[in-house]
Image (spheres, grey):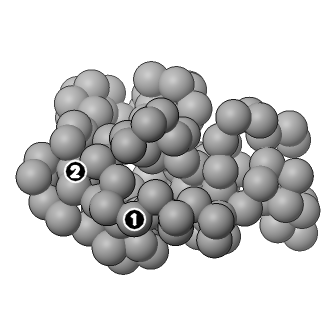
Amino acid sequence: MTQPQDLLFSKDHEWVKLEGDTATIGITDYAQNALGDIVYVELPKVGSNVAQFSQIGVVESVKAVSDLFTPMSGEVTEVNQTLEDDPAAVNRAPYAEGWLVKLRLAKPDEAKSLLSPADYEKIAAD
């Protein structure tokens, strides 16, 4: 399973796309596949401040309920409203329309603690 090369990853199966001082965050294809059909996503409120690796929400599937964690610290500037009516967008396109939140980064250097696509593939393959 090849990961998009312009993203960074956490060991908790979240991805980050960095664009200036903004991070777009979602769950990986591996994670959505392991969860199965996603039926509900709970996300933080816009304006919330979140710390790296803290819980920011919940995703429910037909198989399980799983916590969502943020790979970076910052202020939530946007949540994916599409997921309220169409949580299955995470299954269909986890790296595109299925993104979860956008953050204004508080500590951009935290990116150094995340995994490259190649390193994440090793974890996902285990």
Closest to the camera, between mark 1 and mark 2, is 1
Relative height, residue 25 to residue 71 (above, below): above
**Residue under the image location 65 percent in, 50 percent down:** 8
Which amino acid does the dot numbered 2 rest on?
Val
Residue located beneath label 2 in the image: 76
Residue 40 in the figure: left or right of residue 70? left
Q: Position of residue 14 (x, y in %)?
A: 55, 56
Which image quarter: residue 98?
top left
Mark 1 neighbour class, 10 Å CA radius: few under 14, some 14 to 19, many 20 or more: few
Residue shown at 89% from the left, 69% from the top? 126
Q: Which residue is mark 1?
A: 107
Per the image, label 2 sits on a secondary structure element best described as: strand
* Mark 2 crowd level (few <14, some 14–19, many ≥20, 10 Å Cα): many
Q: Position of residue 38 (x, y in %)?
A: 44, 44
Separation of marks 1 and 2 at Cα, in angstroms:
13 Å
Residue visible at 77% across and 54% down in the picture: 116
- 62 sits left or right of 75 in the view: right
Residue at x 52%, y 67% (from the top left corner): 110
Q: Nearer the viewer, residue 74 or 20?
A: 20
